[in-house]
Amino acid sequence: MTDAQPHDYEKPAREAVASALKELSSGWPEKAALITCQQISHAAQVAKDPHAAVVAVCRGALSGVLLSNQNLPDAVLKLLEKLPDTSLIMRSGPEELMSWVLEGAADVTLVAGPSARDAISAKIEEKFMGVGPVFDALCEKARLKG
């Protein structure tokens, strides 16, 4: 275990995703999700606080999507679709991991804005019934901690 701080995971994730997406015109959501899942796996295995590390990785990776002018809702949905494979190699269950990823995504909506937040919520609810309201609550929590 390491004493790394959450920002130690956020910046590398942002840079890895933004760099990879510069070179892709198609297939980028898949690539972004794979990179993010790799970063999540690493951070969760070495961090003392896997929750904070996973939130930071997701915040960084999804910020990289924004910096690359890509569709944030598509990136979040693809990432959530890839999580079951990632949770198999982690110390946490799939529901816990999903909530941490959603928390990181909620943090990014503060920058992305209400239309991105609403689009993410709608896509999540369409694909993962009942999860949209969880994301909405995490967005409100992120807004309040500001």
Image: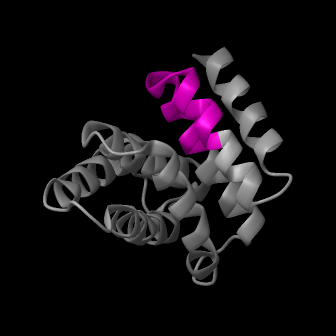
Stretch of the chain drawn in magenta: 103-120
Q: Main secondary structure of the magenta part?
A: helix
* Residue furthest left in the image: 23
Residue 93, given in percent of the width and then of the height, sits at 74, 72
Tell me which residue sits at (58%, 22%) in the image. 114
In the image, residue 8 lies in the stretch drawn in magenta: no
Tell me which residue sits at (53%, 32%) in the image. 116
| Quadrant where the C terminus is found in the figure | top right
Quadrant housing residue 95: bottom right
Residue 51, given in percent of the width and then of the height, sits at 61, 53
Of residues 132 and 141, which is closer to you in this image?
132
Residue 25, given in percent of the width and then of the height, sits at 21, 60
Of residues 117 and 146, which is closer to you in this image?
117
How does the figure colour the protein chain or chains?
A: one colour
Q: Is residue 104 left or right of residue 19?
A: right
Tell me which residue sits at (51%, 22%) in the image. 113
Of residues 117 and 62, which is closer to you in this image?
117
In the image, residue 106 lies in the stretch drawn in magenta: yes
Quadrant housing residue 46: bottom left
Of residues 98 and 6, which is closer to you in this image?
98
Is residue 61 among the parts visible in the rendering? yes
Q: Is residue 27 left or right of residue 86?
A: left
* Residue furthest right in the image: 130
Residue 84, given in percent of the width and then of the height, sits at 64, 77
Is residue 5 among the parts visible in the rendering? no
Q: How many marks?
A: 0
Name above or below for residue 4 compared with residue 106. below
